[in-house]
């Protein structure tokens, strides 16, 4: 059979297109093998104790430098202070598009070993989980990001945009010796970046229902210290008023103080999107949350959910208490620290003034330990659309939600430099596992490592089309 010249050329063109497409993305990773490798990697990584304070993140930074070197990738390690490490690496693309940063932090919060079922720094793998401090926050995120970085290198995937691997110190204390220091001193290394992905959002599993939560904004931290003063003395001779009794009374008043419930536009958008998964009656309330919260019954149930409660009000958590270091000594000074998180648009000075008014004691002094203004990234971006595209392939009926994070991450350091920054890991977590973050028996599901790696891998592909 003879083919016309036109038909022949069409066939050749079609064949050439298939070859180019196949060579562009030459192989689908073995995701079962990825899960196993990521689990082993995370287990080893958890065993590096980077409790902050003091941090000692340099050991973690060098760990990643070694892992990257084994993949044939060069990494740079910086020290913001002695022992405080930052690791940076770049997988080069053609430069047709601007780079994407994969950001995680190297430090973890303290863990009291006696409170745990397992040693929090042993990296134990059991029952489908990797246990350990930082397994979710944020060492599991780092393991997923590294796996994607390594897979792209191993498979020789051509990239239109560079991919940047960045691990920073000190996030758990505000990031001033980590991301803040890096942006101030080495921003030239990432100045060409367009997008950033970090911890915070991901795939949320609530009552068996999933949603892809993309954190485009965060509440502002306002960490406050209360210093109380009073006469010192011997514990055997009680005094009518001391620094400790003043502090206890002040904290009691604060604990009984209810901050105002407010529904910001971003939070309303979040619940409007979640309404698509709810029964009609609840969906109706979610679509007009401000009005719904005037119903005492709904309000009580809604605010009983710690995650929902944190999205509609300024929150206050007493976390640190210090008085005497001897049972028989009445101290002249006592102090407490409050972890407060403020809604976007709130004035921290006014917030502190409101607490001072509640306490109403001139011998209790307030000071702000940490605060920075909340910044948001736009949702109408190529990155957001790419996440939605990947989500629709995996979960066609699941909502993709622009969300406000109740906590904070290092994103604000990069947002103020004009880099679109989202909290999104691709890792699916249940509410039960989410509650373990900063608590006891923190654990990362192996399936989360697998799915997170696959979602993030496909997301990078989507952004390189």
Image (cartoon, rainbow, N blue to C red):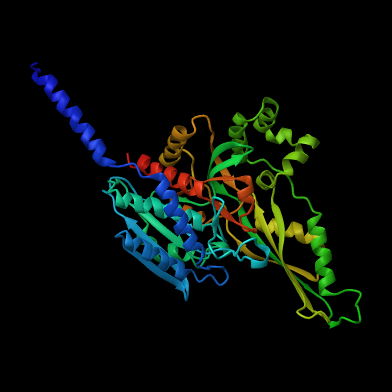
| Residue 243 visible somewhere in the drawing | yes
Q: Position of residue 344 (x, y in %)?
A: 61, 48
Q: Is residue 195 visible?
A: no
Q: Toward which corner of the image does residue 186 lie, by quadrant?
A: bottom left
Point 42% across, 44% down: residue: 454
Q: Quick check: 31 left or right of 215?
A: left
**Image label count:** 0
Residue lying at 36% horizontally and 42% vertically, measured from the top left = 463
Q: Nearer the viewer, residue 32 or 359?
A: 32
Q: Position of residue 401 (x, y in %)?
A: 54, 38
The location of residue 262, given as percent across then percent down, is 69, 43
* Direction from residue 444 to residue 355 in the image, left or right: right
Residue at the extreme front: 127
In this rendered view, identify the residue nearer to me: 221 or 365: 221
Q: Is residue 404 above or below residue 183?
A: above
The residue furthest top is 1
Q: Nearer the viewer, residue 450 or 94?
A: 450
- Tell me: residue 80, above or below residue 423: below
Give the quarter of the image for residue 335.
bottom right
The N terminus: image quadrant: top left
- Relative placement, left or right, of 177 versus 219 is left
Where residue 123 appears, x then y in whole percent? 53, 62
Q: Is residue 414 above or below residue 331?
A: above
- Going 84% across and 82% down the picture, which residue do you hit? 328
Q: Quadrant of the C terminus?
A: top left
């Amino acid at each position: 059979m003879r083919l016309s010249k036109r038909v022949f050329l069409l066939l050749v063109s079609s064949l050439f297109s298939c070859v180019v497409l196949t060579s562009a993305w030459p192989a689908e990773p073995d995701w079962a093998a990825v899960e196993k490798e990521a689990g082993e990697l995370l287990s080893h990584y958890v065993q590096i104790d980077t409790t902050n304070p003091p941090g000692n993140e340099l050991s973690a930074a060098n760990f990643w430098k070694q892992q990257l070197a084994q993949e044939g990738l060069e990494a740079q390690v910086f020290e913001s202070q002695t022992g405080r490490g930052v690791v940076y690496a770049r997988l080069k693309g053609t430069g047709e598009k601007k780079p994407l940063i994969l950001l995680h932090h190297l430090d973890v919060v303290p863990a009291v070993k006696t409170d745990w079922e397992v040693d929090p720094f042993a990296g134990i793998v059991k029952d489908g989980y990797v246990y350990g401090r930082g397994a979710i926050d944020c060492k599991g995120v780092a393991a997923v990001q590294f796996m994607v970085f390594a897979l792209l290198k191993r498979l020789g995937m051509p990239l239109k945009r560079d991919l940047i691997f960045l691990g920073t110190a000190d996030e758990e204390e505000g990031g001033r010796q980590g991301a803040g220091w890096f942006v101030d001193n080495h921003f030239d290394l990432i100045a060409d970046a367009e997008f950033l992905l970090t911890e915070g959002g991901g795939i949320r599993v609530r009552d068996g229902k999933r949603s892809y939560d993309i954190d485009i904004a965060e509440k502002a931290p306002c960490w406050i210290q209360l210093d109380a003063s009073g006469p010192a003395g011997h514990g055997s001779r009680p005094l009518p008023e001391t620094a400790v009794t003043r502090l206890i009374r002040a904290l009691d008043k604060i604990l009984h103080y209810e901050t105002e419930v407010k529904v910001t536009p971003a939070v309303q958008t979040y619940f409007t999107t979640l309404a698509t998964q709810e029964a009609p009656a609840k969906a109706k309330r979610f679509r007009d949350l401000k009005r719904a919260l005037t119903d005492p019954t709904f309000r009580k149930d809604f605010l009983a959910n710690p995650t929902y409660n944190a999205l509609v009000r300024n929150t206050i958590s007493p976390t640190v208490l210090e008085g005497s270091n001897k049972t028989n000594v009445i101290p002249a000074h006592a102090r407490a620290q409050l972890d407060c998180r403020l809604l976007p648009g709130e004035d921290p000075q006014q917030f502190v003034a409101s607490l001072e008014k509640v306490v109403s004691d001139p011998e209790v002094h307030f000071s702000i330990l940490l605060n920075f203004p909340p910044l948001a990234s736009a949702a109408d971006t190529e990155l957001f659309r790419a996440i939605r595209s990947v989500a629709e392939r995996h979960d066609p009926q699941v909502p993709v939600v622009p969300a406000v994070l109740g906590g904070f991450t290092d994103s604000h350091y990069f947002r103020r430099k004009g880099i679109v920054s989202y909290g999104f890991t691709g890792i699916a977590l249940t509410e039960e596992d989410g509650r373990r973050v900063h608590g006891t028996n923190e654990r990362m599901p192996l399936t989360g490592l697998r799915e997170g790696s696959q979602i993030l891998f496909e997301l990078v592909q989507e952004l390189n089309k």
